[in-house]
């Protein structure tokens, strides 16, 4: 069949893989997957995705090869070693081989589990992503890191694996609830602040005029995401140097997301909202360090409001619990820091990390992080 799928190569360090995208392109995605000559597809997804999109992929996939379906209850708690181990055992019992293909079908949580599963199964099998959320399409699939969480924090257990391909049917993004749309947009916004501030005017206009769910807007957001992420990782695919600028907002944002989801489950703050709060807090820290002008920190707050990110921590969040997660942040290994410091991406101005271009992290006193978070806590009444 003649394909109308558009393709862009994702270059991350010294590797690359194709990102295929289109609208109502399910048959073309299946036609491309047929070319993998898989003896089995191991589909990792969640129950919400199955209810919404199963008919777009699974019946056709089962015509190509036997399918092992591994579906999780939505939520961050499923990205664990225990869940991963159970899935690996099930795949082997059902007949997976080194010719099988793991399909990550859904958002970030299924993608993380599927990625590490593909890396471990028989020493590494092929991985393809079929993202169904904005945050997955715009962020998590544009990465080589495949990782799951520990009890202390995010992405503590993992490795790097190059996907065989990403397949995006943008139709699946056009009916997402506003919360999920804005989560993906928030990640694009954070990268605009840290890497490509020239895109902020168009991004804020799309939000202001309510055009985020139009196909041409989704396409622009996708291309902007690819441009920002590949610019940062062009010579650092493992994100251990220059590419760490993509971690802007994540030190505090990851801690907020983990703590809030353990408190409220899937009703906790979205990934994007958490990271934008993390960027807002990082901007306040930069002001306290004498690096950033207050007006630039205020801009962070204005941008966060556009994507419905919190301006303060809700009263139910325990700042000390967040601090325990921040102390275990894996970035501290990339920069020598003292026991009472965290390694963070801090900006002096838009797209100007306080560190060096090759190492954008700087040491930040944990006491200052806690001070800023306490000042942003709802119980203080401060903004």
Image (tube, helix red, strand yellow):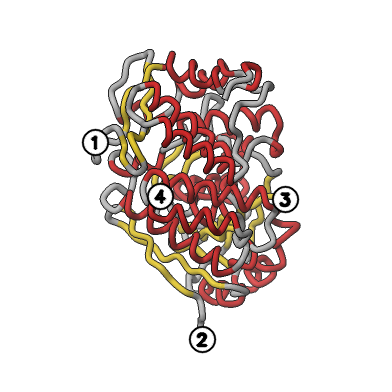
Q: Does residue 292 appear left or right of residue 182 in this picture?
A: left
Q: Which quarter of the figure is the C terminus placed in?
A: top right
Label of residue 356 in the image: 1
Of callouts 2 and 4, which one flags the residue occurring earlier in the amino acid sequence?
A: 2
In the rendering, which numbered label is found on residue 2? 2
Which residue is tagged 4? 144
Q: Which of pointers 1 and 2 indicates the residue nearer the eye?
A: 1
Image quadrant where residue 78 sits: top right
Residue on which the image places disc 3: 47
Q: Nearer the viewer, residue 244 or 49?
A: 244
Residue 279: x and y, percent?
Answer: 47, 35
Callout 1: SS: loop
Q: Residues within 10 Å of mark 2 (few under 14, many from 20)?
A: few
Quadrant location of residue 376?
Answer: top right
Instruction: Tell me: 258 left or right of 232.
Output: right
- Tell me which label, 2 or 3, sits earlier in the chain: 2
Residue in view at x 68 percent, y 52 percent = 178
Q: CA distance from mark 1 to mark 2?
A: 47 Å
Q: What separation in Å lies between label 4 and label 1 (alpha carbons)?
A: 23 Å
Numbered-mark total: 4
Asked if residue 270 can be seen in this view, the reply is yes
- The residues bearing labels 3 and 1 have C-alpha atoms spaced at a distance of 44 Å
In the image, residue 361 above or below residue 64:
above
């Amino acid at each position: 069949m003649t394909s109308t799928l558009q393709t862009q190569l994702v270059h991350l360090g010294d590797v690359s893989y194709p990102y295929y995208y289109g609208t109502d392109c399910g048959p073309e995605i299946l036609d491309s997957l047929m070319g993998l000559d898989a003896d089995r597809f191991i589909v990792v997804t969640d129950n919400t995705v199955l209810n919404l999109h199963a008919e777009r992929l699974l019946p056709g996939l089962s015509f190509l090869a036997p399918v092992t379906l591994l579906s999780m209850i939505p939520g961050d708690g499923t990205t664990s070693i225990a869940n991963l181990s159970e899935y690996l055992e099930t795949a082997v019992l059902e007949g997976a081989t080194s010719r099988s293909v793991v399909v990550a079908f859904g958002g970030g949580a299924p993608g993380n589990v599927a990625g590490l599963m593909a890396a471990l199964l028989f020493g590494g099998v092929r991985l393809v992503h079929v993202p169904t959320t904005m945050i997955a399409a715009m962020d998590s699939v544009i990465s080589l890191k495949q990782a799951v969480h520990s009890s202390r924090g995010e992405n503590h257990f993992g490795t790097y694996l190059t996907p065989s391909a990403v397949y995006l049917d943008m139709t699946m993004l056009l009916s997402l609830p506003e919360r999920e749309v804005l989560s993906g947009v928030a990640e694009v916004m954070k990268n605009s602040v840290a890497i490509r501030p020239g895109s902020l005017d168009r991004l804020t206009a799309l939000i202001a005029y309510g055009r985020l769910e139009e196909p041409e807007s989704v396409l622009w957001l996708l291309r902007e995401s690819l441009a920002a992420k590949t610019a940062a990782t062009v010579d650092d695919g493992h994100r251990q140097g220059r590419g760490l600028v993509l971690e802007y907002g994540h030190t505090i944002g990851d801690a907020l997301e983990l703590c809030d989801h353990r408190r409220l489950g899937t009703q906790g703050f979205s990934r994007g909202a958490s990271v934008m709060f993390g960027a807002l807090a990082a901007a306040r820290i930069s002001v306290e360090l004498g690096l950033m002008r207050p007006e630039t920190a205020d801009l962070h707050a204005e941008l966060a409001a556009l994507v419905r990110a919190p301006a303060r921590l809700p009263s139910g969040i325990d700042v000390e619990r967040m601090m325990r997660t921040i102390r275990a942040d894996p970035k501290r290994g990339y920069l020598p820091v003292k026991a009472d410091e965290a390694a963070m991406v801090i900006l002096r101005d838009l797209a100007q990390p306080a560190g060096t271009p090759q190492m954008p992290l700087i040491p930040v006193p944990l006491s200052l992080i806690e001070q800023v978070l306490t000042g942003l806590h709802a119980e203080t009444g401060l903004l």
